[in-house]
Image: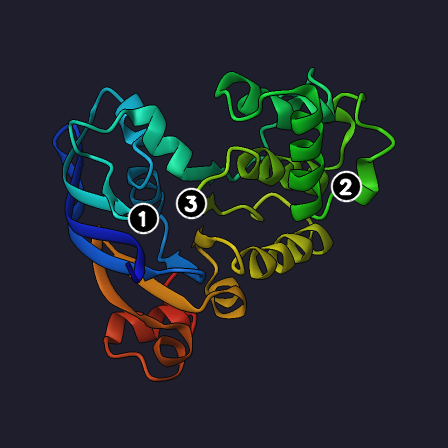
Amino acid sequence: MRWAVDVRNLNVWYGLKHVLKNVSLRIPRNMVFAIMGPSGCGKSTLLRAMNRLLELNPLAKVEGEVWINGVNIYSDEVDPMDARRLAGMVFQVPNPFPHLSIYENVALGPKLNGIVRSKKELDELVEWALRKAYLWDEVKDELKKPAARLSGGQQQRLCIARTLALKPKIILMDEPTANLDPVAASKIEELMLELKEDYTVVIVTHNPQQAARVSDYVAFLYMGEVIEVGETSNVFTTPKHELTEKYVVGKMG
């Protein structure tokens, strides 16, 4: 199957507010796909719909289909926890478990989900995930120290390692650099480009410049609707819609 994610006629309400309106889009495999748009347009809601996190909000109502790796995650036969393992989430604010060690932050998910069968396998998985997140060389001698001691950028990469350890099919990132300094943000952007060799990365950003830097494909959302989807180079150089053009040139915040 060509598509890592296939969203079909997705509608989301928070109470009476219609937040996403008949959203359909397809995300190719092994790409960085950016969802961009002004604040309040539904970007984060769309991302959360891709791993059923919306169900944690009692006011949310979801209609439509979201297919991840050929599985309709909104099928009655799919457990929400299985859906969340298919699509790992990295949030805007780094959220490691502060009182757990660096090692335990990465190891906890695989232990709880029965991904490993021995301490040796767990050690190897933790090292693998930290290496994939470009953090191993910085923390390999401090694995027993609390995660709270890491810098903001390191904490975000630890959260990415924690996500990778659960072996997801896609990685969802909700403005993962918004609270980082430029140097730390640059490292996360470089990491996204590396991760797409093995994963599909879907990033939400309010920054069109970031979308232009890191993504292969982009979707522009406005007031809950998909206005334009396409290869990033095409959308930024020859946008088909006037709203898209205003956004990418900075005339719309």
Q: Nearer the viewer, residue 227 or 17?
A: 227
The CA distance from mark 1 to mark 3 is: 7 Å
Q: Residues within 10 Å of mark 3 (few under 14, many from 20)?
A: some
Marker disc for residue 241: none
Instruction: Give the image quarter of residue 18.
Output: top left
The CA distance from mark 2 to mark 1 is: 29 Å
The residue singled out by tag 3 in the image is 169
Residue placed at 63% from the left, 39% from the top? 156
Q: Earlier in the sequence, mark 2 or mark 1?
A: 1
**Element on which disc 1 rests:** loop
Residue placed at 76% from the left, 21% from the top? 146
Rendering coords of residue 198 (x, y %): 52, 55
**Which quarter of the rendering shows the C terminus?**
bottom left
The CA distance from mark 3 to mark 2 is: 22 Å
Q: Are marks 1 and 3 in contact (CB under 8 Å)?
A: yes
Q: Residues within 10 Å of mark 2 (few under 14, many from 20)?
A: some
The residue singled out by tag 1 in the image is 69
Q: Amino acid at mark 3?
A: Lys
Vertical relation: 133 (above or below) 211: above
Rendering coords of residue 159 (x, y %): 60, 35
Q: Amino acid at mark 2?
A: Trp
Q: Are marks 3 and 2 in contact (CB under 8 Å)?
A: no
Q: Amino acid at mark 1?
A: Asn
Rendering coords of residue 113 (x, y %): 48, 21
Taking 54 as reference, is 123 left or right? right
Instruction: Give the image quarter of residue 116.
Output: top right
Q: Earlier in the sequence, mark 3 or mark 2?
A: 2
**Element on which disc 2 rests:** helix
Taking 114 as reference, is 118 left or right? right
The residue singled out by tag 2 in the image is 136
Rendering coords of residue 236 (x, y %): 40, 77
